Image (spheres, rainbow, N blue to C red):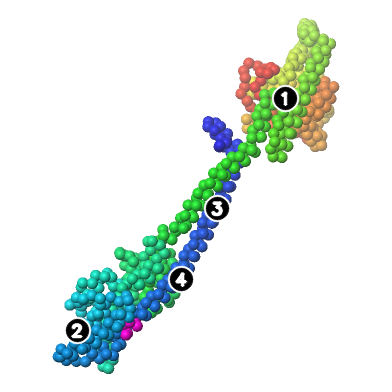
């Protein structure tokens, strides 16, 4: 069963570990099977062709020996006739017009031919043709001699010979007897008057070609093999094929220096050998379909075995991938339960050692998370109770607002405008900071307005020693930021950078920069700055703001001093926007400090601040 299903499951299945393992294992096994099969088939093919070549050479050598024995026997037979002194004497003497002499001469020649005829069983007929036109025959049947034999090609070939044997070839009927339609192998040689060294006739021999054809059939390597027997001139003496193309036959390889040749030519195996005695060339041509019968069976066997092995590989790959991925799927399912808040499950699997370790670690982690959640719940309840008790012991903030407003109006009636402005700013600042909800977000406009009240008090307190420049573009006014983002940064700049100045007036700038869909809020002062070691330590503390221990320690120390603190601000920025954003400091001794608050530029929401769970940037 394949490890993927339709729909979106197909896409997910392609990227699953089960699918990847299945494909990897299947491809590996299939590649091994294919490689071994190809190598085995190629090696078998080479060995088979080598074996065929060796057997072909042995076969042609044996057949050449048979031809030599056969032709040497025919050569001896012909010499026993043409070299017979009585025959040459009778044929060389002038014709005597005497019936008695003719009768005795004919009987003598008949006896000579009969002795040669009976010496071998495969002889069909022996014919002696004199240059005077006299014909002597000996055979099993009465002969009807072709009267035009002198004009035939075979007669011209034998007559033109200087005494050598002329192998005429295999014919489908007698070349001299008009009534004998049996297949014959014909050869002949001239008859010479040894005393006068002149030709006096020719001797033609016709034999049963069965020995020739049997020897040629012995050279066939397959059912469709074709064997050709050619003389030194390239003429076909005998062939097992009924039709052939002379041009194609001329392109076939020939033996070199009497050495047999075995070559591949035009998808055929050609075996060529030369017969020394008769100067013949024998060619055996076998198509690949005959030679590759065993290879075809081997290929079919390999395909069947390969298919079985591939099917086995599919089953094995499926089982192996399922065995490895099934525990992981169960682990993923259990993780999804944890995602929805179910921490009470415990996963039990028995698989490979690494997976068992992974599952055990997961169970331990889930149990630890469940314990921590319980601790947080208990701690949260205790903290809420403590806050409730603290609130109960505090003065009603509305009473403070109303009192400060009353002081402002009293100062306004008496003309103390500057002091009244400070009191009013203090009232609004206190009202803004006292409405605190954990994780609350406000707009940048609200945060800037609160900072202006705070700076009014600071500028008044420093009595002209501080110049403030706040430039927040209207385009960014509705961007959400954590509440009390700017106040702790400005407070640190004034307290640690600007107040200690004695040689020059202090300058504080608040401005914005946009870069790569990020907004950088810059709070720069020209105060006393920090040395490199102090700056590095403070930036390192800000980077560790996510660490619970650092947060608790710094937050506790800062609360004791009454401020929210930079570390606390860093934690709230990262909680709202993520770890890629937050606060960073740049400073140089006696040249000032710049605090850079980096936040993302996200869709803005109209209508002022966002409170509590309203802001969309968490997570």
* N-term-proximal mark, 4 vs 1: 4
In front here: 351 or 515? Answer: 351
Q: CA distance from mark 2 to mark 3?
A: 77 Å
Q: CA distance from mark 2 to mark 4?
A: 47 Å
Q: Which residue is mark 4?
A: 58
Left or right: residue 365 compared with residue 137: right
| Disc 2 element | loop
Q: Which residue is mark 2?
A: 134
Q: Which residue is mark 3?
A: 35
* N-term-proximal mark, 3 vs 1: 3
Residue 103 shown in magenta: no
Q: CA distance from mark 4 to mark 1?
A: 85 Å
* N-term-proximal mark, 4 vs 3: 3
x then y, percent, for residue 478? 64, 20
Instruction: Tell me where residue 289 sits by quadrant.
Output: bottom left
Q: CA distance from mark 3 to mark 1?
A: 52 Å
């Amino acid at each position: 069963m394949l490890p993927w299903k339709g729909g979106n499951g197909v896409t997910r299945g392609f990227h699953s570990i089960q699918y990847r393992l299945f494909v990897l294992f299947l491809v590996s096994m299939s590649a091994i099977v294919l490689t071994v099969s190809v190598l085995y088939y190629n090696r078998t093919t080479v060995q088979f062709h080598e074996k065929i070549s060796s057997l072909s050479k042995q076969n042609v050598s044996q057949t050449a020996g048979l031809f030599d024995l056969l032709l040497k026997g025919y050569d001896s037979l012909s010499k026993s006739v043409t070299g017979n002194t009585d025959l040459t004497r009778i044929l060389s003497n002038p014709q005597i017009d005497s019936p008695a002499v003719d009768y005795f001469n004919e009987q003598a020649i008949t006896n000579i031919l009969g002795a040669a005829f009976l010496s071998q069983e495969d002889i069909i007929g022996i014919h002696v043709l004199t240059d005077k036109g006299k014909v002597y025959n000996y055979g099993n049947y009465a002969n009807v001699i072709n009267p035009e034999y002198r004009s035939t090609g075979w007669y011209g070939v034998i007559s033109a010979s200087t005494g050598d044997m002329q192998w005429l070839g295999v014919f489908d009927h007698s070349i001299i007897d008009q009534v004998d339609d049996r297949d014959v192998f014909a050869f002949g040689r001239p008859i010479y008057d040894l005393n006068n060294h002149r030709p006096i006739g020719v001797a033609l021999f016709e034999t049963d070609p069965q020995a020739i054809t049997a020897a040629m059939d012995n050279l066939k390597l397959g059912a469709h093999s074709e064997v050709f027997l050619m003389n030194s001139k390239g003429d076909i003496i005998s062939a097992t094929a009924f039709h052939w193309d002379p041009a194609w036959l001329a392109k076939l390889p020939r033996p070199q220096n009497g050495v047999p040749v075995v070559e591949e030519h035009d998808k055929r195996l050609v075996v060529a050998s030369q017969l020394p005695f008769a100067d013949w060339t024998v060619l055996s041509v076998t198509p690949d379909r005959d030679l590759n019968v065993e290879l075809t069976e081997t290929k079919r066997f390999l395909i069947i075995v390969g298919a079985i092995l591939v099917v086995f590989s599919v089953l094995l790959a499926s089982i192996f991938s399922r065995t490895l991925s099934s525990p992981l799927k169960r682990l993923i399912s259990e993780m999804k339960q944890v995602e929805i808040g179910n921490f009470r499950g415990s996963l039990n699997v028995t698989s490979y050692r690494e997976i068992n370790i992974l599952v055990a670690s997961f169970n331990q982690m889930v149990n630890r998370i469940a314990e921590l959640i319980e601790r947080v719940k208990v701690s949260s309840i205790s903290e809420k109770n403590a806050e409730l008790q603290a609130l109960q012991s505090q003065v009603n903030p509305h009473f403070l607002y109303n009192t400060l407003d009353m002081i402002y109006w009293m100062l306004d009636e008496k003309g103390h405008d500057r002091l009244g402005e400070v009191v009013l700013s203090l009232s609004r600042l206190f009202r803004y900071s006292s409405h605190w909800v954990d994780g609350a977000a406000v707009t940048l406009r609200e945060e800037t307005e609160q900072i202006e009240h705070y700076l009014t008090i600071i500028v008044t307190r420093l009595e002209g020693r501080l110049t403030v420049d706040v430039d927040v573009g209207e385009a960014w006014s509705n961007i959400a930021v954590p509440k009390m983002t700017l106040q702790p940064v400005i407070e640190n700049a004034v307290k640690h950078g600007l107040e200690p100045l004695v040689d020059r007036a202090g300058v504080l700038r608040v401005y914005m920069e946009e870069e790569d869909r990020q907004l950088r809020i810059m709070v720069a002062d020209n105060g006393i700055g920090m040395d490199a070691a102090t700056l590095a330590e403070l930036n390192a503390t800000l980077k560790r703001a996510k660490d619970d221990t650092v947060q608790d320690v710094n937050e506790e120390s800062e609360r004791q001093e009454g401020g929210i603190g930079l570390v606390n601000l860093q934690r709230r920025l990262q909680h709202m926007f993520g770890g890629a954003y937050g606060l960073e400091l740049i400073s140089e001794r006696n040249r000032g400090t710049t605090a850079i608050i980096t936040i993302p530029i996200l869709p803005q929401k109209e209508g002022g601040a966002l409170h509590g769970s309203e802001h969309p940037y968490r997570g």
